[in-house]
Image: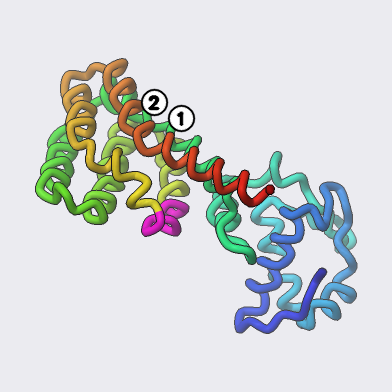
Amino acid sequence: MLKPIKRQSLSEAVFEQLRDQIVAGSFGAGELLPAERILSEKLGVNRGALREALKKLEQARLVSIQHGGSTRVLDFRHTAGMELLTQLLVGPSGFNLEVARSVVEMRTALAPDIARLCAERRDAGVVERLEGVLLAMEAAAGDLPTIQRIAMDFWSELVDGSGNLAYRLALNTLREVYLQLQGLLTETLSDELSFLVGYRAVVDAVKKQDGARAAKKAKELVTKGGDKLIAALDAALELKGS
């Protein structure tokens, strides 16, 4: 049910509440939202705040504002962009486990190809930058939270070296999601974070411009943590559903 808005930023609060209702299916794809007057009354906000929120929903490709002022809900699975992931990860009832699992699966799928492209398109300086990051990780051996932070720089350098803008933007989104979960994932990712020889193997493959080996070693690396994350999320989802 819609409820009155009590937060300081009215338009942002309206946006979040309507977004959550749309994603949850309370407003189905193709359905018209209630008229502005009705929404304003139910939410307890003025028309200006409501219209600003509706504009944000349109920019997020969750609704289409039609001629005459009516607002139709879109099927976000077919229209929304990756930025919605960061907004959906944490909801009113806590972390969205299904979204978290999707992000982990995407990370596992992208990492090998990012490493492959970085090796094959190796730009001047990428190996030197990766070596610098790797040295920092090795210097922090045993300090998993520090390695965890540095590892984000490792993947950032790899994706820059890949020369793939789509992967770069995808990694930006994954990073935002990851930062929200970072403290909760350190222990689960311990096998991956402590596998420094695995990071070294990726760098060596990039250095030799061996794309196939870089992809193989990157997959070995991320599955060390990814498999445990998926197992933990699946167990949590099963528990939630029981």
Q: Is residue 111 left or right of residue 154?
A: right
Q: Nearer the viewer, residue 213 or 50?
A: 213
Residue count near mark 2 (Cα–Cα under 10 Å), binned few <14, some 14–19, many ≥20: many
**Image: magenta residue range:** 176-184
- Helix, strand or loop for disc 1: helix
Q: Residue at x 71, y 67 (%)?
A: 17
**Spot occupied by residue 128 in the image (x, y as percentages of width and height):** 13, 36
Label 1, residues with CA under 10 Å away: few <14, some 14-19, many ≥20: some
| Residue at 18%, 31% in the rendered image | 197
What residue is pinned by disc 1? Answer: 109
Residue 41, x across and y down, in percent: 85, 80
Task: Give the secondary structure at mark 2.
Answer: helix
Kindly identify which residue carries mark 2: 113
Q: Are marks 2 and 1 in contact (CB under 8 Å)?
A: yes
Q: Residue at x 42, y 39 (%)?
A: 228
User: Image check: 13 left or right of 27?
Assistant: left
Q: As shown in the figure, which amino acid type bears the numbered disc 1?
A: Ala
Residue 62 magenta-highlighted: no
Question: Where 225 falls versus 141 (above or below)?
Answer: above
For residue 214, above or below residue 75: above
